[in-house]
Image: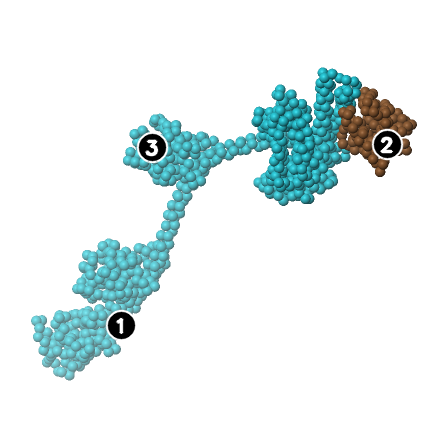
Amino acid sequence: MIHSSSVTQELVAIERLESLARVSRRLASTLSLDEILQDILEEAITSSAANGGAISLYRYSDNRFDRRQTSGLTLSSRETRELEKGIPSDISIRVHDDLINDIGIHSAVTVPVTYEGMIAGLFSLYSKNIQHFDPLTVEFIDTLAKMTTVAIVNARMYQDTLQRERFYAALGRVTLAINATVNLPTLLNLVCQESLGLFNVEGAYVWIRRDDRLIGIAAEGYANSEFLGSDVSISENQDFAAVVANEGRGVFSNYFHDDRRYLRTYRWQQALQAALAVPLTQDEEVIGVLQLVETTEPDRFSIQDVEQIAFFGAQAAIAVKNAQLVTDMRQLNEELDLRVAERTKALGEERDRVQYLLRITNELAASLDQDRVLIRALELVNEVVQATHGSIMLVDSVTGELIYPSAFDTHKLPPLPRVDLGLRPEEGLAGWIIRNREAIIIDDSREDDRWEAKSRNPELRSIIAVPLIANDEVIGVLTLFHHKPNAFTQEQLKLVSAAAMQVASAISNAQLYLLIRDQAERLGNMLRVEHVETAKNQAILESIADGVLVADANGMVVLSNYSASQILEIPRNKLSGKSVNELLGLYSSVGENWIQKVDKWSRSTREEAETQFLADRLSIEDKYVSVRLSPVFARGQFFGTVSIFRDVTQAVEVDRMKSEFVSTVSHELRTPMTSVKGYAELMLMGATGSVTDQQKKYLGVIKSNADRMSELVNDLLDISRIESGKTTLDLQAVNLKQIIRDHVDGHLKTQIKRMGKEIIVLCQLPNELPMANADSDRVLQILTNLTDNAVNYTAQKGEITIGVQLRGDMIQTHVSDTGLGISKENQPKIFDRFYRVEDTDIQQVSGTGLGLAIVKSLVEMHGGTIEVASELGVGSSFFFTLPIFFEN
Amino acid sequence: MAKILIVEDETDIRELISYTLTFSGFEVVGASNGEEGLELAAAENFDLILLDVRMPRLTGYDACKQLRQMERTKETPIVFLSAKGQEDDMEAGIAAGADRYILKPFAPAALVEEINQVLATRSVERDV
């Protein structure tokens, strides 16, 4: 330094002021920090006559100084470490005067660049001279450092604004894109692309979370194609993106290459120098990760970057969400479309199937002829299946065996037998089907044991066999065959099964129709027969001469015939619905009794009432009508009455005439008999002079024959009177024992004596015997007739026994003899009128043939019965009963 | 000697009775019909009148009733002798006022016995 110090100092000061002015102008004219820093550094070096310098900026993210500008001689970063020790906590200006290094720098000054008390950078100048930086120079440099602060702040502000603008512009584009497109890959690629530009990084990736995994889905820049498809586990992998997803916050690693915290799964991760990632969240849930990477420049990211990218990530998340919604929607739509298409297809198939089944149903329903149904059923089913053979076997409802009513054969193979094979329903494939009620396909009959007819029908390889089920009952088996194996599909089986239901139903219908037709025919026939019968019965009922009235249980007439109305002289329309009681009332006192009786019947359920009836002869107007009224019972229940009316006026008239005739005849006979008998007796008496023995004998013959005729006439009159009802009984309490005793002692013994026979009469009478309710004259007549017969038909010697026993309400009397006896075949006839056994022995005995008929009538008039027990040559016994007398 | 009127249209029978009774010691007057019988009965006294029932012009019943109306014969025993042997016939006869009803054909001896009985009864009644 040879110049005068003051002048020099003046000049230096002026020069420095000019330098400051230039820097100020630069600060105002440019916003490029590097340019300004370069200018400031150049001005500082020049103005302070330094050999070199450097400006570093402090990075708070990693507490390091980042050298931004150098000029001239500079120490390396490593060499400056010692000089910068204590910074940034100590921000005083440091002047070093005695440095020793390889490049010959001996003095240095380090001025911190601060902004509002915070370190922002370092301004360093170097000089080869020792003690080069005097206090004025340091002050000048400090001033420049302050100007640097301004530059830095300005530049930062500008940068920030610029960055923000760029960010918002990018955000705007992304948002716009999100709204404009819903294509997720496109959107995510856009997010990557914008991130790439915005954050000035080499690569931008988007991971999307799928359950516990992150999948690389969009990428721009470095290794983008390699990234796509990357796949890491969130919970297990210590992969960078996985850690971010796991922790749910933004993370960056500026020295990723050396960062051992993170796992590197993929090759593209090996080259990374710096990485930053933020989670993409939706409703606090991590749905993906946005990752930025650098491969060349470490130390690239700051916390601000994290914040900004997080912002970006939020947009990306929305995009993902929207896109997912859209994708979901689209997928849903596609699925719906697919399902609609599938359903349409299924419906189409179903429709075809239903149409097919409908056709089967229609065609089969149209025919009720079973054979036709079966043949047509096979044809229709086979339209779908294209089998070579088919058969329907039915279970015969009678034998229970399987029969083949129908079969077809398209390939002229040996036809299936149509005859009854005598197959039991439990045998063979058909048996299996019937047992299991299952439709099956046999792909190859040679390998299936259920097909037992292998040897008989080896050409039948594929088989579909389905049961025919109607009303839950297996009525048969439908079988289709193909000569190739594996000929049938499950679809066909389904269709055949469905068709089989229709076929079964059609067969069942046909069978039912047969049954119904048969029954209808039978019923029709029955109805016709019934009709004819009814008409016949009606005609018979109408045409019979007897009047018929049928009354219900209430006594109302429900049926009548023409004769009834004629006989009762009541118009037919008035008969119907009339009460029988009212009609019976016509018959006065008899009717009253009947009404009571009918009433009793109606309340009776006893079977014995079934054998009862009421009969009487009534006179209505000038007619005689016989009425018989019977109850109708069914299963113990009274149903009503049937009354039969018969106009017996004519019969009564005939009867009367007969009686008159008999009476007249008997009178007319008696008159001549009187002469015959009288004169004979007169002569026998000797009133006409003496008669010879011969004459006496012959006169005796005349007399006895006259007596016999007289007896005959009496009997005739008796029977006539009994039959015409003119004989009435005078019923009283009768001491039967007494009557018998009197009869035996009187008439019987006299008769035996008169006949000149030696017959012993035995009486077997109980000590105690109730009175009989009888007419004593008639009882005597009965006894006389029976004992006369006994005497007449007993030989010279014999025995007659008369006995009495009590038989319930009746007293039984028997008259037994040891006479000729009556043969079995004649026994029933002996009570007939005028019947006489054709036997010479018997014919010798005089008799009219009316005696027993009269006895029977008299006994029955008493309400008793008469029976005979006899053995030819041994004797006869007659038993007759009379009722016991009861008071009232 | 009792005197008996026989009213009987059948000649054979009238003669039979007549002979029998004459043989048995009775005095006998015969009439061949009811009217004739009534005339004879009105003309003279008889101890007993035998009446046939069925006769032309006047039946035995009517004749009997008329006889009972007549003073001469109202107490005279009347015996019917008839072929009509039915109960109501006999009842009708008794109702007409007869004492007895004898059925044809009869045994002559029995007839005589019956007549003796009636006469005996009547004489007892008269005595009483």
Left or right, A721 with reference to A184: right
Residue at 42%, 31% in the rendered image: A375
Estimate the spatial distance between the alpha carbons at disc 2 and disc 1, rounded to whole Å.
Answer: 199 Å
Q: Is residue A222 above or below residue A42?
A: above
Nearest the camera: A550 or A455?
A: A550
- Picture coordinates of residue A350 (x, y %)? 41, 42
Q: Chain of mark 1?
A: A
Placement of the C terminus of chain A among the 4 image quadrants? top right
For disc 1, the neighbor class at 10 Å (few under 14, some 14 to 19, many from 20) is some
Residue located beneath label 1 in the image = A154
**Quick check: do tags 1 and 3 share a chain?**
yes
Rendered shade, chain B: brown
Task: Give me the chain letter of mark 3.
Answer: A
Gap in angstroms between the C-alphas marked 2 and 3: 135 Å
Q: Residue A692 at what x, y percent from top left?
A: 74, 16
> Chain drawn cyan, letter?
A
Q: Secondary structure at mark 3?
A: strand
The mark lying in front, picked from 1 and 3, is: 3
Q: Residue furthest bottom?
A: A6
Please name the residue shown 79% across and 33% down the image: B91
State the SS at label 1. helix
Tell which of A878 and A741 is nearer to you: A741
Residue A335 is at least partly visible in this image: yes
Q: Which quadrant holds the N terminus of chain A?
A: bottom left
Residue B97 visible, this orientation: no
Circles 2 and 1, Cβ within 8 Å, touching? The answer is no
Query: Mark 2 = which residue?
Result: B76
Give the labeled residue for mark 3: A482
Residue type, numbered disc 3: His
Mark nearer the N terminus (1 vs 3): 1
Give how far apart the Cα atoms at labels 1 and 3 are: 95 Å
